[in-house]
Image: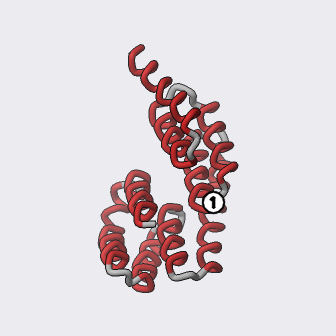
């Protein structure tokens, strides 16, 4: 689980605008500190303050959901997962050709344990933007996490091929 938390914080930092990161930094720092001390209720309080500032940032909901899971609060966990899905699905509805949004949803699906949905979102992301390094790397990472090493290797070879052609 610690690996998931670190992954979520890194994911979050790469997806929040710089201005918002500055505002959220104290809350994220405190969240991480409390989580390292296994004080999940306090970590939840801190990340909730960050959500108040950035209510449409799905990564924040996933971090909080992870702490709810550790606190064995399945109802709150599911509420945050549902909120994250709601946000990304609205974004997809508004911009259905944006491959990055499908990778965001794949991340939520992975976190929620919806393995088949992860594969579908990854396939959609690649079909929308088959030559984008970021999309390919994110897709490869998701497929590797699922244990789909054959597809992950195909994507890795495509990345190498695209890199060699540039």
107 or 26: which is nearer to us? 107
Q: Residue at x 59, y 63 (%)?
A: 84
53 or 40: which is nearer to us? 40
Quarter of the image where the C terminus is located: top left
In the depicted structure, whether residue 53 falls above or below residue 105:
below
Q: Residue at x 51, y 37 (%)?
A: 135
Residue 18, percent from left and from top:
34, 55
Residue 52, percent from left and from top:
48, 75
In the depicted structure, whether residue 139 falls above or below residue 114:
above
The answer to whether 3 appears left or right of 152 in the picture is left
The picture quadrant where one finds residue 159 is top left
Q: Residue at x 30, y 76 (%)?
A: 33
The answer to whether 85 appears left or right of 154 in the picture is right
50 or 108: which is nearer to us? 108
The picture quadrant where one finds residue 25 is bottom left
In the depicted structure, whether residue 145 falls above or below residue 43:
above
139 or 17: which is nearer to us? 139
The answer to whether 139 appears left or right of 34 in the picture is right
Q: Which residue is mark 1?
A: 113
């Amino acid at each position: 689980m610690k690996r998931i938390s670190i992954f979520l914080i890194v994911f979050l930092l790469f997806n929040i605008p710089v201005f918002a990161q500055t505002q959220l930094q104290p809350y994220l720092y405190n969240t991480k500190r409390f989580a390292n001390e296994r004080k999940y209720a306090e970590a939840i309080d801190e990340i909730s303050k960050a959500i108040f500032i950035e209510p449409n940032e799905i990564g924040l909901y996933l971090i909080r959901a992870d702490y709810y899971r550790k606190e064995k609060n399945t109802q709150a966990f599911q509420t945050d997962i549902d909120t994250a899905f709601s946000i990304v699905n609205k974004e997809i509805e508004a911009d259905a050709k944006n491959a990055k949004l499908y990778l965001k949803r794949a991340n939520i699906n992975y976190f929620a344990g919806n393995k088949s949905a992860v594969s579908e979102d990854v396939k959609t992301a690649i079909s929308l933007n088959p030559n984008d390094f970021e999309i390919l790397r994110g897709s490869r990472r998701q497929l590797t996490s699922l244990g789909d090493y054959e597809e992950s290797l195909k994507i890795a070879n495509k990345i190498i091929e695209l890199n060699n052609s540039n």
